[in-house]
Image (spheres, coloured by chain):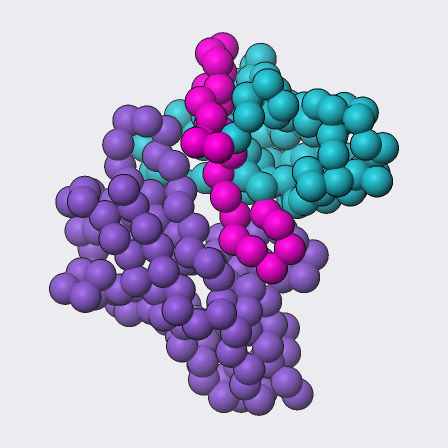
Amino acid sequence: AQKVTQAQTEISVVEKEDVTLDCVYETRDTTYYLFWYKQPPSGELVFLIRRNSFDEQNEISGRYSWNFQKSTSSFNFTITASQVVDSAVYFCALSEADAAGNKLTFGGGTRVLVKP
Amino acid sequence: GAVVSQHPSRVICKSGTSVKIECRSLDFQATTMFWYRQFPKQSLMLMATSNEGSKATYEQGVEKDKFLINHASLTLSTLTVTSAHPEDSSFYICSARTRDLTYEQYFGPGTRLTVT
């Protein structure tokens, strides 16, 4: 069975600080997909990134960067120079590439509070 | 592209009544739709997976007679909460997957159900 663990339940930072969100996953599949979503107070999930298990390249998108390490089953997310608008709950998720609908398993989420 | 809508966005109903939530893929055909439930300050939990034209597959612990799911077309899935009780109050989110194999799910904005 697949499992996603986000050990940090809440992180509070002051604007312009960097913040790193940890994500550790468990799966028996060799082919799988990892995701990060942002959920602002409005509730709507915002897709941030998808990464497949064969692509370990780190990625940077603006102030966001992701570090995927299969050796430690981790897919960490860093927000550089945080802003108040980054305040939200962030979810890491895993999907195994089977034929049964590719269910997403979510981590518990990390609430990020960026103070001005 | 890949927009998913939900209706209504908020609903309040009395205990014992039934309420229907619609999930529509607006600009693509969704072979598979997923229904999630999210209690306050918790993660998203998958309730069921529905494929167009077939019966939904429910996750363990989800009562299929209480949460009726219908996926009658490639653009519409409905979730009916029957005989609602206050403990059913939650944020219900649907997602839709396209025919391709990107394994990406597109999420609706969610429906907040309050049962009084």
Q: Give the vertical position of A64 relative to B84 (above or below).
A: below
* Residue at x-position 63% and y-position 23%: B66
Residue found farthest to the top: B53
- In this orientation, does residue B53 appear? yes
Q: Give the vertical position of B3 relative to A84 (above or below).
A: above
Q: Give the vertical position of B112 relative to B54 (above or below).
A: below
* Residue at x-position 55% and y-position 21%: B64
User: How many marks do you count on the picture?
Assistant: 0
When asked about the image quadrant of residue A80, the answer is: bottom left
* Residue at x-position 48% and y-position 32%: B61
- In this orientation, does residue B28 appear? no
User: In this structure image, what is the colour of chain B?
Assistant: cyan
Q: Position of residue B72 (x, y in %)?
A: 58, 13
When asked about the image quadrant of residue A111, the answer is: bottom right
User: In this structure image, what is the colour of chain A?
Assistant: purple
Q: Position of residue B71 (x, y in %)?
A: 56, 17
Q: Nearer the viewer, residue B2 or B49?
A: B49
- Residues shaded magenta: B38-61
Left or right of A76, for residue B4? right
Q: Nearer the viewer, residue B82 or A45?
A: B82
When asked about the image quadrant of residue A76, the answer is: bottom left
Q: Nearer the viewer, residue B3 or A108?
A: A108
Q: Is residue B113 magenta?
A: no
Q: Position of residue A53 (x, y in %)?
A: 21, 51
Left or right of A27, for residue B90? right
Q: Give the vertical position of A115 relative to A34 (above or below).
A: below
* Residue at x-position 45% and y-position 76%: A79
Left or right of B92, for residue A10? left
Q: Position of residue B68 (x, y in %)?
A: 61, 20
Q: The N terminus of chain B is located in which quarter?
A: top right
Q: The C terminus of chain B is located in which quarter?
A: top right
